[in-house]
């Protein structure tokens, strides 16, 4: 399975990995992926788990695995160095050396990389196995974040172009995997689109499988779960028809992952139960670890604490038996998170201290960072702050070296929470201030990146549409030629009269016209579907971009950016189904409050963008107050429980005014203005709105600077803002 960055306690669920190193959602140690119904490890039933000591648990989990006979080596096997560990053993028997190395890479990617390099040297450029071996090698390098090596492998694949027509699109696919693994989703999709355009209709299974799962991951990351499922369903059919059993296991993990992220937890559990059954029958320890890991993630959203802990224990045991040290280190970090969350700081400390040397030995920096952070948080919680802070500083230093600014910000927020719980209030305040500063900087960067990705996504869709149209045009021309041939044959063979010929031509013309109408209608329907958020039914970013493209670059209207307060807390307490119910109800309330011709956009996650006509300042402030009341007056009911909600709103009337003069503002700058105004509303207690009344800026660069530093401009008088408070929230979670 793919490496995946371990999660920090309190930061939400980890992303789900892809099988056979198609791409990695995050970096670092390997993790099992999705939820399933696994076996209970002997001696670790739910009741017993609550009674055993930390030392007994750790000793049992970290005991040496029973030695197993190595998998039979195929005839074309390449000898590995004597010091290399034996591959994880299961009842699966590889049919070739390449198949063996691919299977080995799921549990021991570093060993597989060495074997693949050696195996590739035995093959000639014309041997079709070389391209498959290099693609497998590159995918494993992606999994271990070996960036320079990935590019070397891609260049080596491209060098085969003279004798291997598939070399160029294969190299593009590999680069797309790397970009996808590093959250460059739009650029990754561009690579996949271009690679698909160069591929013939019939390609080898290994290449089609990688294309399907990478494309599925890209679509899933973008929230296009239906499009991701199309790719994954095709992948599972391919695996079931012609793939080895471990591919069938892994692809089911992908399908379950998308269902889980889409909020279809019951269906995800069913698919993972099938995944666990296949893994158990095949004796596939890494597959069983994957299912147990995901089952623990799913159960962590509910009240079954004993079941969650049992699933983590099973994930650790199967990781140990598989020989996957990355997965073992990661799952020790995950179970330490569990103990931190439940206040068992001594056990959390013990687990983290066992994970730390393991992560350091395999040079897994993300897992090392998590282990250090968990040690520090456990010590702080045990009133041993002076011992814990060096571990936390070292963890943040590792995050800084890897450029993980968001990890640093999240760590600061998490540290503030634990310092506050432990009674170190001045230190907690300092940590919260650091988080706010970092979060503000990250938010500005995220907004800029979102706008860039929006433009890239639009370009990708346009390119894909162009390719689809070319393909359809080609098929249409083929059909026209076919009709023409039939017409000539009929003319020659039967000698139809001119009247009959005219009738045939008219029929063909009608058929062509109907087909063109159907094609136009289909294209229009696809365009509409692409611009609608599937959960709320509101317009999405793609629609907003289409609107922007048809209007003047300068914005004229009143723009509101609405962010739901404490949405992560709602997800944590009520599950993702509860969060979805809140989003659906918020969309309904916004529609009820606004006019039919007002534009309402689900901007992303828990954020909504509203564009209405330009209006006087007093009217815009009154509308902001109505929006606050519409969202906060009545709690949302979910499964018989009241979920209190409120929102923070930033808004402004554009063009911006300075007395009697106006300042034209483009779309991107306007969004930055209301975004920073929204964060000022949050900084002043949430459940409120911050409106921009006037600004003083001499030119466009001055406006851009003012948008970036709105709070400073307010303090020094260059901007006049208006703060509003929402109603008392009923049913708000504490």
Image (cartoon, rainbow, N blue to C red):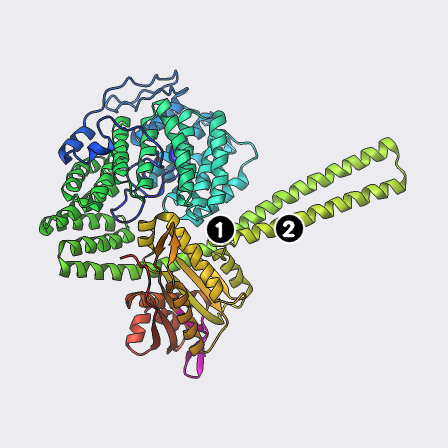
Where in the figure is residue 689, as x and y percent of width and height? 36, 69
Q: Total of numbered circles in the picture? A: 2
Where in the figure is residue 179, as x and y percent of width and height? 40, 45
State whether residue 411 appears in this view: yes
- The part of the chain drawn in magenta is 651-665
In this view, the residue in front, 582 or 416, is 582
Left or right: 190, with 106 as reference point: right
Indicate yes or no whether the magenta region holds residue 190. Answer: no
Q: Which residue is drawn at 25% across and 24% down?
A: 85
State whether residue 133 appears in this view: no
Q: Which corner quadrant of the image does residue 92 belong to?
A: top left
Q: Which residue, given by chain and number where applicable, does mark 2 sit on?
A: 521
Instruction: Examine the rendered structure and indicate whether residue 648 appears above or below residue 330.
Output: below
Which quarter of the rendering shows the C terminus?
bottom left
Where in the figure is residue 174, as x and y percent of width and height? 42, 38
Q: Which residue is drawn at 84% across and 43% down?
A: 503
Q: Which corner quadrant of the image does residue 22 belong to?
A: top left
Which quarter of the rendering shows the N terminus?
top left
Question: Circle 2 — which element?
Answer: helix
Q: Which residue, given by chain and number where applicable, does mark 1 sit on?
A: 534
Instruction: Examine the rendered structure and indicate whether residue 342 appears above or below residue 602.
Output: above
Q: Which residue is drawn at 41% across and 20% down?
A: 96
């Amino acid at each position: 399975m793919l490496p995946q960055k371990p999660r920090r306690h309190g930061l939400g669920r980890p992303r789900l990995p892809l099988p056979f190193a198609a791409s990695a959602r995050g970096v670092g140690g390997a993790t099992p992926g999705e939820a399933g119904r696994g076996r209970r490890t002997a001696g670790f039933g739910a009741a017993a788990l609550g009674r055993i000591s930390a030392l007994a648990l750790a000793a049992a989990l970290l005991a040496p695995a029973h030695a197993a006979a190595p998998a039979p080596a195929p005839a074309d096997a390449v000898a590995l160095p004597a010091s290399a560990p034996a591959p994880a053993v299961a009842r699966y028997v590889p049919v070739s050396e390449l198949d063996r190395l691919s299977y080995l890479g799921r549990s021991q990617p570093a060993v597989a990389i060495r074997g693949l390099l050696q195996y590739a040297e035995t093959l000639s450029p014309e041997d079709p196995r070389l391209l498959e071996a290099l693609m497998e090698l590159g995918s494993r390098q992606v999994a271990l974040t070996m960036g320079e090596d990935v590019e070397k492998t891609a260049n080596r694949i491209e060098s085969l172009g003279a004798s291997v027509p598939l070399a160029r699109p294969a190299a593009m696919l590999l680069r797309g995997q790397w970009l996808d693994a590093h959250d460059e989703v739009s650029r990754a999709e561009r690579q996949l689109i271009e690679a698909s355009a160069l591929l013939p209709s019939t390609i080898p299974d290994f290449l089609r499988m990688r294309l399907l799962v990478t494309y599925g991951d890209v679509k899933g990351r973008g929230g296009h779960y239906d499009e991701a499922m199309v790719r994954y369903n095709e992948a599972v059919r391919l695996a079931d028809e012609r793939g080895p059993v471990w591919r069938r296991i892994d692809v089911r993990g992908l399908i379950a992952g998308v269902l889980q992220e889409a909020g279809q937890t019951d269906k995800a559990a069913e698919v993972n139960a099938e995944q666990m059954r296949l893994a158990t029958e095949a004796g596939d320890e890494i597959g069983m670890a994957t299912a147990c890991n995901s089952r623990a993630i799913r159960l962590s959203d509910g009240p079954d604490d004993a079941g969650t802990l049992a699933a983590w224990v099973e994930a650790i045991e199967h990781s140990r038996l598989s020989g996957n040290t990355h997965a073992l280190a990661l799952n020790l970090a995950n179970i330490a998170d569990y103990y931190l969350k439940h206040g068992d700081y001594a056990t959390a400390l013990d687990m983290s201290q066992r994970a730390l040397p393991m992560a350091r030995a395999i040079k897994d920096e993300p897992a090392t960072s998590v282990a250090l952070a968990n040690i520090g948080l456990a010590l702080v919680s045990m009133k041993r702050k002076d011992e814990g802070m060096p571990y936390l500083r070292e963890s943040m230093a590792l995050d800084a070296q890897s450029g993980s600014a968001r990890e640093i910000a999240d760590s600061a927020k998490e540290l503030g929470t634990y310092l506050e719980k432990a009674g170190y209030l001045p230190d907690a305040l300092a940590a919260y201030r650091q988080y706010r500063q970092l979060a503000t900087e990250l938010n500005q960067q995220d907004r800029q990146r979102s706008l860039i990705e929006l433009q890239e996504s639009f370009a990708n869709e346009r390119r894909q549409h162009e390719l689809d149209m070319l393909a359809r045009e080609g098929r249409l021309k083929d059909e026209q030629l076919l009709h023409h041939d039939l017409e000539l044959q009929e003319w020659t063979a039967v000698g139809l009269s001119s009247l009959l010929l005219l009738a045939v031509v008219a029929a063909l013309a009608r058929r062509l016209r109907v087909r063109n109408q159907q094609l136009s209608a289909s294209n229009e329907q696809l365009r509409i579907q692409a611009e609608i958020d599937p959960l709320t039914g509101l317009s999405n970013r793609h629609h907003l971009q289409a609107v922007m493209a048809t209007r003047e670059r300068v914005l004229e209207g009143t723009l509101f950016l609405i962010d739901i307060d404490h949405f992560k807390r709602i997800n944590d307490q009520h599950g993702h189904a509860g969060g979805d119910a809140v989003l659906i109800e918020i969309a309904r309330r916004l529609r009820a409050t606004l006019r039919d011709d007002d534009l309402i956009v689900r901007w992303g996650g828990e954020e909504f963008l509203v564009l209405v006509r330009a209006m006087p300042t007093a009217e815009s402030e009154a509308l902001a107050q109505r929006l606050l009341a519409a969202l906060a007056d009545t709690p949302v009911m979910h499964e018989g429980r009241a979920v209190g909600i409120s929102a923070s709103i930033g808004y402004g009337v554009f063009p911006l005014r300075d007395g009697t003069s106006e300042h034209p503002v483009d779309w991107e700058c306007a969004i930055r203005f209301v975004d920073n105004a929204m964060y000022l509303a949050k900084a002043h207690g949430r459940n409120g709105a911050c409106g921009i009344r006037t600004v003083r800026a001499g030119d466009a660069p001055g406006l851009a600077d003012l948008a970036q530093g709105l709070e400073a401009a307010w303090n020094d008088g260059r901007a006049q803002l208006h703060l509003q408070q929402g109603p008392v929230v009923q049913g708000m979670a504490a």
